[in-house]
Image: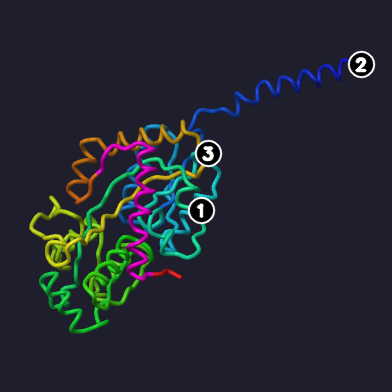
Amino acid sequence: MSSRTCRFALALGVVSLFAWAPAAVAQPYPAKPIRIVVPFPAGGIADIYARIIGNRLTETWAQPVVIENRTGAGGNIAAELVAKSPPDGYSLVMGSLGTHAVNVTLFSKLPYDPVRDFAPIAQVLEAESLLVVHPSVPVQSVPELIAHARTFPGKLTFASAGMGTASHLAGELFKSMAKLEMTHVPYKGNVPAITDLLAGQTSLIFATMPTVLPHAKAGKLRALATIGAVRSAAAPELPTVAEAALPGFEVTNWIGLFAPAGTSAEIVHRLNAEVMRLMQSPEIQARTLGEGARSSPNTPEQFSAFVKAEIAKWAPVVRASGARAD
């Protein structure tokens, strides 16, 4: 073969390669496994629903969805990991009130920006929570708890799922509004916090209903009140903290799915559609209502506006409580 022929063949090959490359790169999403990073240990509500969503996506798209629990720093480790991942739709995080609304005020140096560094996909659910005490605490109501705490300043300990979580914020808000002293004991998630509470290592916790209501019904913990704006359909006999003793007291936890900023709108909306289809199914709706949670249809744009509003809502509350994580 002459040198001219060789050069022509080589040039033709290069042209063919470049002509083929876009088709090869532009594979339909998803073309490989997806991971959902959860900032809390297995067994908590964020982990449970990440796995439910992961199973649904695996069945629908025939691609594995791997759940990766990365705990620590009030959820910041997991959030930062995904914020700095490639914006290709293959790394997602199950964010929460803590990671995407409270921590920006609670921590003086947050390693990510909850708005700038993420593409919100969908708010998965809002979870109602309970104030529960260990049976050794000699109280039967919220007013009695407040009176006991004032009689024995600093004796009571409140557990939380970690710095900046809804359970931490609820405890700080309770202390501030009731004008009492309690010692905060942070854990790496609700599950270890509740485990120690059941063992009597701490006095009380403000925790999501699915994680503590079964223990209260079994008599292992004593439920005093719900901490939302209205009574819960899952436990209608319990008053809210607001109606029992502290008007205006309200804390609602939520979880939602986020991708790194820069993820294409097509991928974000496709993920939103699948998550909403699952969360609005009769089976999941019945489950969430029975667990004291609720899920409503929402778009990525609506979820984005919600996150910004939550940051603005909780910033003055965190500052007023005096809580700091560093």
Q: Is residue 174 above or below residue 211?
A: below
Q: Amino acid at mark 2?
A: Ser
The x and y percentages for residue 233 are 13, 50
Q: Amino acid at mark 3?
A: Asp
Camera-nearest residue between 96 and 242: 242
Q: Contact, CB < 8 Å: mark 3 with mark 1?
A: no
Q: Residues within 10 Å of mark 1 (few under 14, many from 20)?
A: some
The magenta span reads 295-323
Q: Amino acid at mark 1?
A: Leu
Q: Is residue 187 above or below residue 19?
A: below
The x and y percentages for residue 324 are 41, 69
Q: Which residue is tagged 3?
A: 88
Question: Is label 1 in a helix, a strand or a loop?
Answer: helix
> What residue occupies the far left of the structure in this picture?
237
Question: Mark 2 or 1, which is nearer the eye?
Answer: 1
| Label whose residue precedes the other's in the sequence (3 or 1) | 1
Please give the name of the residue rendered at 45% of the width and 64% of the height, measured from the top-left corner.
Answer: 107
Q: Which residue is tagged 1?
A: 81
Picture mark count: 3
Q: Which residue is tagged 2?
A: 2
Please give the name of the residue rendered at 37% of the width and 43% of the height, measured from the top-left corner.
Answer: 305
Q: Residues within 10 Å of mark 3 (few under 14, many from 20)?
A: some
The x and y percentages for residue 185 are 33, 73
Q: CA distance from mark 2 to mark 1?
A: 55 Å
Please give the name of the residue rendered at 11% of the width and 60% of the height, measured from the top-left corner.
Answer: 239
Q: CA distance from mark 3 to mark 2?
A: 45 Å
Q: CA distance from mark 3 to mark 1?
A: 14 Å
| Label whose residue precedes the other's in the sequence (2 or 1) | 2
